[in-house]
Image (tube, helix red, strand yellow):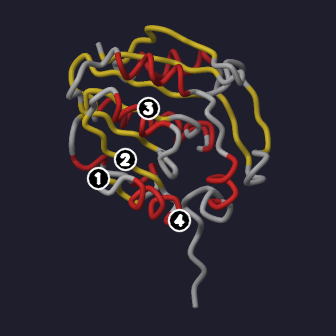
């Protein structure tokens, strides 16, 4: 029997703990961003986890939501909580983004889980799957840093805001705003130009 690599970067193994411990950090930032998109905007939430607390924020803004997560356990919980929302269980590195373009893409708590080359490829894929003038919101530490994730024990790294700004520009996206939530998480809002 061959051992399959964990394409969820360790999150499937700790899914129950994550679902139990997930805080409301980021809700106000995502709410402000979501309400600026306009009713009916199509939004893809990448790395959605089990959907809480952010999917209700997107739904309350009357957005057309689709979701992707690599953890089978979290996808199962998401499907149970939000049966009407399309969700794909696949790693972002291999995702086809539903073979669609979106008005906005959200990636909270995801990009820094990927190696540097994969972060750059991810930004490029996001840009390719955004409609003209589409929005991208993601979280990552402002500074260049590396650390071991407290929950999964796996390596995480932030390229830092200047490198993200450059990567975004190379993919046709411009940083419009940055924000910091009550828990100290840093957010970048970019738009396709």
Q: Read off the residue under disc 1.
A: 86
Question: Label 2, label 1: how many angstroms apart (C-alpha)?
Answer: 6 Å
Q: Residues within 10 Å of mark 2 (few under 14, many from 20)?
A: many
Q: Who is closer to the viewer here, 51 or 152?
A: 51
Q: Label 3: state its secondary structure.
A: helix
Tag 4 near tag 1, CB within 8 Å: no
- Image position, residue 180 (x, y; %): 63, 15
> Which mark sits nearer the N-terminus, 2 or 3?
2
Q: Residues within 10 Å of mark 1 (few under 14, many from 20)?
A: some
Q: Quadrant of the C terminus?
A: top left
Q: Is residue 22 above or below residue 108?
A: below
Q: Read off the residue under disc 4.
A: 73
- Image position, residue 174 (x, y; %): 40, 12
- Image position, residue 72 (x, y; %): 49, 65
Left or right of residue 4: residue 169? left
Q: Read off the residue under disc 2.
A: 67
Q: Residues within 10 Å of mark 4 (few under 14, many from 20)?
A: some
Question: Label 4, label 1: how many angstroms apart (C-alpha)?
Answer: 16 Å
Q: Residue at x 68, y 19 (%)?
A: 182
> Which mark sits nearer the N-terminus, 2 or 4?
2
Q: Residues within 10 Å of mark 3 (few under 14, many from 20)?
A: many
């Amino acid at each position: 029997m061959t051992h399959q690599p964990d394409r969820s970067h360790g999150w499937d193994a700790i899914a129950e703990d994550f679902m139990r411990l997930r805080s409301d950090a980021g809700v106000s930032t995502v709410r402000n961003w979501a309400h600026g998109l306009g009713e009916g905007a199509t939004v893809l939430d990448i790395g959605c986890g089990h959907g809480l607390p952010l999917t209700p924020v997107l739904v309350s803004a009357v957005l057309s939501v689709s979701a992707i997560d690599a953890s089978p356990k979290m996808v199962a919980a998401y499907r149970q909580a939000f049966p009407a929302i399309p969700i794909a269980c696949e790693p972002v590195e291999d995702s086809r983004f539903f073979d669609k373009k979106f008005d906005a893409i959200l990636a909270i708590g995801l990009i820094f889980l990927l190696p540097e080359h994969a972060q750059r490829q991810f930004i490029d894929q996001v840009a390719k799957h955004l409609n003209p003038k589409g929005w991208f919101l993601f979280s990552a530490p402002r500074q260049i840093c590396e650390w071991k994730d407290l929950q999964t024990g796996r390596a995480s790294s932030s390229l830092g805001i200047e490198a993200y700004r450059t990567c975004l520009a190379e993919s046709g996206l411009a940083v419009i705003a940055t924000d910091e939530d009550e828990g100290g998480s840093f957010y970048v809002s970019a738009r396709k130009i």
